[in-house]
Amino acid sequence: MVLAAGRGQRMQPLTSVLPKPALPMPDGPVVASALRLAVSAGATRVVVNVSHLAERMAEAVSGMTISGVEIALSFEDELMGTAGGLAVARDRGFLGDEDSVLVVNGDGAFGLDLGGFAEHHLARGDLVTLALLPHLDPQRWSRVVLDVDEQVSEIHPPGRPAPLEVPFLYPGVMAVRRDALEALPAIPGEIADALWGPAQMERKLGGRVVTGHWREIGTPTDYLEVTLLRLAGSRWIDPSAEVAAGASIRESLVGRGAVVADRAVIEESVVAEGASVGEGARVTRSVLFGAVEIAPNENVVRDFRAAVR
Protein backbone atom coordinates (compact mmCIF):
# COMPACT_ATOMS: atom_id res chain seq x y z
CA MET A 1 0.00 0.00 0.00
CA VAL A 2 1.19 3.49 -0.88
CA LEU A 3 0.00 6.29 1.41
CA ALA A 4 -0.97 9.32 -0.67
CA ALA A 5 -4.02 10.88 0.98
CA GLY A 6 -2.54 13.68 3.12
CA ARG A 7 -3.12 17.40 2.71
CA GLY A 8 0.57 18.26 2.36
CA GLN A 9 0.39 21.40 4.49
CA ARG A 10 4.15 22.01 4.38
CA MET A 11 4.00 21.94 0.57
CA GLN A 12 1.66 24.92 0.35
CA PRO A 13 0.94 26.78 -1.84
CA LEU A 14 1.62 24.04 -4.39
CA THR A 15 -0.81 21.58 -2.80
CA SER A 16 -3.70 23.96 -3.35
CA VAL A 17 -3.45 22.86 -7.00
CA LEU A 18 -2.16 19.27 -6.79
CA PRO A 19 -1.72 16.72 -4.00
CA LYS A 20 1.93 16.37 -3.03
CA PRO A 21 2.31 12.81 -4.44
CA ALA A 22 0.88 14.03 -7.77
CA LEU A 23 3.43 16.81 -8.30
CA PRO A 24 5.07 16.37 -11.71
CA MET A 25 8.62 15.14 -12.23
CA PRO A 26 10.48 14.16 -15.37
CA ASP A 27 9.91 10.44 -14.74
CA GLY A 28 6.28 10.63 -13.59
CA PRO A 29 4.53 12.12 -10.56
CA VAL A 30 6.20 12.03 -7.14
CA VAL A 31 4.21 8.91 -6.20
CA ALA A 32 5.82 6.98 -9.07
CA SER A 33 8.95 6.55 -6.97
CA ALA A 34 7.02 4.72 -4.24
CA LEU A 35 5.23 2.56 -6.81
CA ARG A 36 8.50 1.58 -8.45
CA LEU A 37 9.98 0.72 -5.06
CA ALA A 38 7.03 -1.54 -4.23
CA VAL A 39 7.40 -3.31 -7.57
CA SER A 40 11.14 -3.77 -7.02
CA ALA A 41 10.29 -5.49 -3.74
CA GLY A 42 8.06 -7.97 -5.59
CA ALA A 43 4.61 -6.42 -5.29
CA THR A 44 2.17 -7.35 -8.05
CA ARG A 45 -0.76 -5.37 -6.60
CA VAL A 46 -0.46 -1.87 -5.15
CA VAL A 47 -3.21 0.06 -3.36
CA VAL A 48 -3.01 3.86 -3.25
CA ASN A 49 -5.24 5.77 -0.85
CA VAL A 50 -6.47 9.19 -1.95
CA SER A 51 -8.40 11.97 -0.21
CA HIS A 52 -7.05 15.52 -0.64
CA LEU A 53 -7.86 16.60 -4.22
CA ALA A 54 -8.74 12.97 -4.79
CA GLU A 55 -9.64 13.31 -8.46
CA ARG A 56 -6.29 14.89 -9.28
CA MET A 57 -4.46 12.17 -7.34
CA ALA A 58 -6.45 9.45 -9.08
CA GLU A 59 -5.67 11.07 -12.44
CA ALA A 60 -1.95 11.04 -11.70
CA VAL A 61 -2.01 7.36 -10.71
CA SER A 62 -4.21 6.25 -13.59
CA GLY A 63 -1.82 7.88 -16.04
CA MET A 64 0.95 5.51 -14.99
CA THR A 65 1.62 2.11 -16.49
CA ILE A 66 3.83 -0.38 -14.68
CA SER A 67 4.11 -3.73 -16.38
CA GLY A 68 2.69 -6.67 -14.46
CA VAL A 69 1.26 -4.59 -11.61
CA GLU A 70 -2.35 -3.91 -10.73
CA ILE A 71 -2.97 -0.50 -9.14
CA ALA A 72 -6.13 0.04 -7.09
CA LEU A 73 -7.39 3.26 -5.50
CA SER A 74 -8.91 3.57 -2.04
CA PHE A 75 -10.93 6.79 -1.82
CA GLU A 76 -11.42 8.42 1.59
CA ASP A 77 -14.26 10.93 1.89
CA GLU A 78 -12.87 11.81 5.32
CA LEU A 79 -9.12 12.03 5.78
CA MET A 80 -8.37 8.95 7.89
CA GLY A 81 -4.69 9.44 8.65
CA THR A 82 -2.02 6.87 7.93
CA ALA A 83 -3.36 4.15 10.23
CA GLY A 84 -7.02 4.77 9.43
CA GLY A 85 -6.26 4.68 5.72
CA LEU A 86 -4.72 1.23 6.10
CA ALA A 87 -7.75 0.01 8.04
CA VAL A 88 -10.20 1.35 5.46
CA ALA A 89 -8.32 -0.32 2.60
CA ARG A 90 -8.28 -3.55 4.61
CA ASP A 91 -12.03 -3.44 5.25
CA ARG A 92 -12.68 -2.88 1.55
CA GLY A 93 -10.76 -6.05 0.72
CA PHE A 94 -7.97 -4.22 -1.11
CA LEU A 95 -5.22 -5.76 1.02
CA GLY A 96 -6.19 -9.40 0.70
CA ASP A 97 -6.71 -11.63 3.69
CA GLU A 98 -3.35 -13.24 4.39
CA ASP A 99 0.36 -12.47 4.68
CA SER A 100 2.08 -9.20 5.47
CA VAL A 101 1.64 -5.89 3.66
CA LEU A 102 4.41 -3.57 2.47
CA VAL A 103 3.55 0.06 3.25
CA VAL A 104 5.35 2.95 1.54
CA ASN A 105 4.92 6.69 1.99
CA GLY A 106 3.87 8.26 -1.30
CA ASP A 107 5.83 11.49 -0.94
CA GLY A 108 9.48 10.44 -1.00
CA ALA A 109 12.15 9.96 -3.64
CA PHE A 110 13.37 6.41 -3.15
CA GLY A 111 16.51 4.69 -4.30
CA LEU A 112 16.45 1.91 -1.71
CA ASP A 113 17.54 -1.70 -2.10
CA LEU A 114 14.95 -3.80 -0.25
CA GLY A 115 16.64 -7.08 -1.06
CA GLY A 116 16.17 -9.41 1.91
CA PHE A 117 13.80 -7.03 3.71
CA ALA A 118 10.66 -9.14 3.23
CA GLU A 119 12.49 -12.34 4.12
CA HIS A 120 13.86 -10.74 7.28
CA HIS A 121 10.39 -9.56 8.31
CA LEU A 122 8.76 -12.95 7.74
CA ALA A 123 11.54 -14.90 9.45
CA ARG A 124 11.56 -12.72 12.56
CA GLY A 125 7.81 -12.68 13.13
CA ASP A 126 7.69 -9.04 14.25
CA LEU A 127 4.34 -7.29 14.04
CA VAL A 128 5.98 -4.40 12.19
CA THR A 129 9.42 -4.12 10.60
CA LEU A 130 10.78 -0.69 9.72
CA ALA A 131 13.25 -0.24 6.88
CA LEU A 132 16.01 1.99 8.26
CA LEU A 133 18.98 3.95 6.95
CA PRO A 134 22.02 5.28 8.78
CA HIS A 135 20.85 8.71 9.86
CA LEU A 136 21.43 11.58 7.45
CA ASP A 137 20.62 14.48 9.78
CA PRO A 138 19.48 13.76 13.36
CA GLN A 139 18.75 17.44 13.91
CA ARG A 140 16.16 17.38 11.10
CA TRP A 141 14.39 14.02 11.34
CA SER A 142 13.33 11.68 14.15
CA ARG A 143 15.87 9.15 15.40
CA VAL A 144 15.17 5.43 15.65
CA VAL A 145 17.33 3.36 18.01
CA LEU A 146 17.75 -0.42 17.77
CA ASP A 147 18.81 -2.77 20.54
CA VAL A 148 21.10 -5.78 20.08
CA ASP A 149 18.10 -7.91 19.01
CA GLU A 150 17.18 -5.52 16.15
CA GLN A 151 14.15 -4.35 18.08
CA VAL A 152 13.21 -0.66 18.10
CA SER A 153 13.98 0.40 21.65
CA GLU A 154 13.41 4.13 21.27
CA ILE A 155 12.09 6.71 18.81
CA HIS A 156 13.31 10.24 19.54
CA PRO A 157 12.29 13.57 18.04
CA PRO A 158 14.91 15.42 16.00
CA GLY A 159 17.90 16.50 18.07
CA ARG A 160 21.46 15.74 19.00
CA PRO A 161 22.00 12.00 19.63
CA ALA A 162 22.94 10.95 23.13
CA PRO A 163 26.49 9.71 23.79
CA LEU A 164 26.97 6.21 22.33
CA GLU A 165 23.56 6.41 20.57
CA VAL A 166 23.52 5.05 17.02
CA PRO A 167 20.59 6.82 15.33
CA PHE A 168 18.75 5.46 12.31
CA LEU A 169 16.40 7.19 9.91
CA TYR A 170 12.96 5.89 8.93
CA PRO A 171 12.48 6.76 5.24
CA GLY A 172 8.83 5.69 5.06
CA VAL A 173 8.89 1.96 4.28
CA MET A 174 7.64 -0.82 6.55
CA ALA A 175 6.19 -4.32 6.55
CA VAL A 176 3.06 -4.99 8.63
CA ARG A 177 2.08 -8.48 9.75
CA ARG A 178 -1.49 -9.56 9.10
CA ASP A 179 -2.60 -9.74 12.75
CA ALA A 180 -1.28 -6.22 13.40
CA LEU A 181 -3.17 -4.99 10.34
CA GLU A 182 -6.37 -6.71 11.48
CA ALA A 183 -6.10 -5.04 14.89
CA LEU A 184 -6.19 -1.51 13.47
CA PRO A 185 -9.47 0.31 14.16
CA ALA A 186 -11.13 1.92 11.14
CA ILE A 187 -11.06 5.39 12.67
CA PRO A 188 -8.85 8.39 11.95
CA GLY A 189 -5.41 7.80 13.43
CA GLU A 190 -1.70 7.73 12.77
CA ILE A 191 0.65 4.80 12.41
CA ALA A 192 3.02 5.87 15.18
CA ASP A 193 0.27 5.63 17.83
CA ALA A 194 -2.02 2.93 16.45
CA LEU A 195 0.59 0.52 15.03
CA TRP A 196 4.11 1.19 16.25
CA GLY A 197 3.18 1.82 19.89
CA PRO A 198 1.39 -1.51 20.47
CA ALA A 199 4.10 -3.40 18.56
CA GLN A 200 6.85 -1.79 20.62
CA MET A 201 5.04 -2.67 23.85
CA GLU A 202 5.18 -6.33 22.81
CA ARG A 203 8.81 -6.00 21.67
CA LYS A 204 7.70 -6.80 18.16
CA LEU A 205 8.63 -3.54 16.44
CA GLY A 206 11.67 -4.58 14.47
CA GLY A 207 14.11 -2.69 12.32
CA ARG A 208 16.13 -3.75 9.30
CA VAL A 209 18.95 -1.55 8.01
CA VAL A 210 18.80 -1.30 4.21
CA THR A 211 21.07 0.33 1.66
CA GLY A 212 20.43 3.02 -0.92
CA HIS A 213 19.25 6.59 -0.73
CA TRP A 214 16.13 8.60 0.09
CA ARG A 215 15.13 12.23 -0.27
CA GLU A 216 12.24 13.85 1.53
CA ILE A 217 9.83 15.82 -0.64
CA GLY A 218 8.13 17.74 2.13
CA THR A 219 8.42 21.40 1.14
CA PRO A 220 8.41 23.38 -2.13
CA THR A 221 12.19 23.72 -1.83
CA ASP A 222 12.57 19.94 -1.47
CA TYR A 223 10.38 19.42 -4.51
CA LEU A 224 12.37 21.79 -6.67
CA GLU A 225 15.72 20.36 -5.58
CA VAL A 226 14.68 16.75 -6.25
CA THR A 227 13.20 17.72 -9.63
CA LEU A 228 16.47 19.39 -10.62
CA LEU A 229 18.39 16.29 -9.57
CA ARG A 230 16.12 14.16 -11.75
CA LEU A 231 16.56 16.53 -14.69
CA ALA A 232 20.35 16.16 -14.36
CA GLY A 233 21.03 19.29 -16.37
CA SER A 234 18.47 18.55 -19.10
CA ARG A 235 14.97 19.89 -19.69
CA TRP A 236 11.57 18.21 -19.88
CA ILE A 237 8.58 19.69 -21.73
CA ASP A 238 5.12 18.12 -21.60
CA PRO A 239 3.48 17.62 -25.02
CA SER A 240 0.53 19.76 -23.92
CA ALA A 241 2.70 22.77 -23.04
CA GLU A 242 2.89 25.74 -25.43
CA VAL A 243 6.45 26.99 -25.67
CA ALA A 244 7.26 29.76 -28.17
CA ALA A 245 10.14 29.10 -30.54
CA GLY A 246 12.02 32.08 -29.16
CA ALA A 247 11.73 31.00 -25.50
CA SER A 248 14.69 29.54 -23.63
CA ILE A 249 14.16 26.54 -21.34
CA ARG A 250 17.24 25.66 -19.27
CA GLU A 251 17.39 22.75 -16.80
CA SER A 252 13.65 23.06 -16.16
CA LEU A 253 10.38 21.15 -16.26
CA VAL A 254 7.58 22.75 -18.27
CA GLY A 255 4.53 20.69 -17.40
CA ARG A 256 0.96 20.12 -18.45
CA GLY A 257 -0.85 23.11 -19.92
CA ALA A 258 1.96 25.60 -19.30
CA VAL A 259 2.37 28.55 -21.67
CA VAL A 260 5.76 30.17 -22.22
CA ALA A 261 5.85 33.22 -24.50
CA ASP A 262 8.52 34.45 -26.88
CA ARG A 263 11.86 35.56 -25.41
CA ALA A 264 10.89 34.21 -21.96
CA VAL A 265 13.65 32.43 -20.03
CA ILE A 266 12.92 29.54 -17.68
CA GLU A 267 15.95 28.30 -15.74
CA GLU A 268 16.14 25.68 -12.97
CA SER A 269 12.40 25.94 -12.44
CA VAL A 270 9.07 24.13 -12.76
CA VAL A 271 6.17 25.74 -14.65
CA ALA A 272 3.10 23.53 -14.85
CA GLU A 273 -0.65 23.03 -14.50
CA GLY A 274 -1.56 25.90 -16.82
CA ALA A 275 0.79 28.56 -15.46
CA SER A 276 1.85 31.14 -18.03
CA VAL A 277 5.03 33.16 -18.46
CA GLY A 278 4.80 36.37 -20.48
CA GLU A 279 7.02 37.65 -23.26
CA GLY A 280 10.53 38.51 -22.15
CA ALA A 281 9.94 37.37 -18.55
CA ARG A 282 12.59 35.43 -16.63
CA VAL A 283 11.85 32.69 -14.08
CA THR A 284 14.77 31.40 -12.01
CA ARG A 285 14.74 28.61 -9.37
CA SER A 286 11.00 28.93 -8.91
CA VAL A 287 7.84 26.80 -9.12
CA LEU A 288 4.67 28.13 -10.76
CA PHE A 289 1.40 26.14 -10.77
CA GLY A 290 -2.16 26.73 -11.92
CA ALA A 291 -3.69 30.13 -12.57
CA VAL A 292 -0.41 31.99 -12.17
CA GLU A 293 0.42 34.58 -14.82
CA ILE A 294 3.87 36.10 -15.00
CA ALA A 295 3.71 39.50 -16.69
CA PRO A 296 5.85 40.38 -19.71
CA ASN A 297 9.42 41.24 -18.68
CA GLU A 298 8.75 40.30 -15.05
CA ASN A 299 11.68 38.76 -13.15
CA VAL A 300 10.79 35.91 -10.75
CA VAL A 301 13.56 34.53 -8.56
CA ARG A 302 13.30 31.82 -5.86
CA ASP A 303 9.54 32.06 -5.61
CA PHE A 304 6.75 29.51 -5.24
CA ARG A 305 3.36 30.53 -6.60
CA ALA A 306 0.19 28.52 -7.12
CA ALA A 307 -3.45 29.43 -7.70
CA VAL A 308 -6.56 27.41 -8.42
CA ARG A 309 -8.36 28.14 -11.66
Image (tube, rainbow, N blue to C red):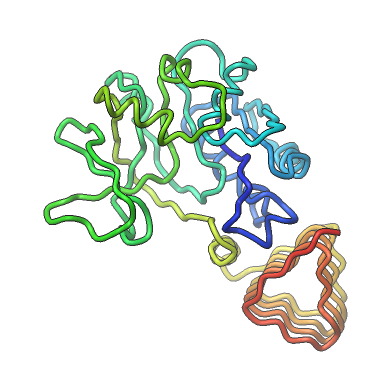
Q: Quadrant of the N terminus?
A: top right
Q: Position of residue 272 (x, y in %)?
A: 76, 62
138 on left or right of 148: right
Asked if residue 151 is positioned above or below residue 109 in the image, the reply reads above
Camera-side residue of 107 and 139 = 139
> Residue most toward the top?
97
> Residue at coordinates 84% horizontally, 60% vertically from top-left?
257
Q: Position of residue 67 (x, y in %)?
A: 65, 31
> Residue at coordinates 60% horizontally, 54% vertically from top-left?
9
Asked if residue 123 is positioned above or below residue 230 in the image, the reply reads above
Asked if residue 5 is positioned above or below residue 306 in the image, the reply reads above
* Quadrant in which residue 309 is drawn: bottom right
* Quadrant in which residue 106 is drawn: top right
* Quadrant in which residue 150 is drawn: top left
Q: How many marks?
A: 0
> Residue most toward the left?
164
Camera-side residue of 207 and 67 = 207
Asked if residue 163 is positioned above or below residue 306 in the image, the reply reads above
149 on left or right of 277: left
Q: Position of residue 40 (x, y in %)?
A: 49, 35
> Residue at coordinates 85% horizontally, 58% vertically from top-left?
240
210 on left or right of 98: left
Q: Position of residue 135 (x, y in %)?
A: 30, 53
308 on left or right of 48: right
> Residue at coordinates 26% horizontally, 35% vertically from top-left?
152
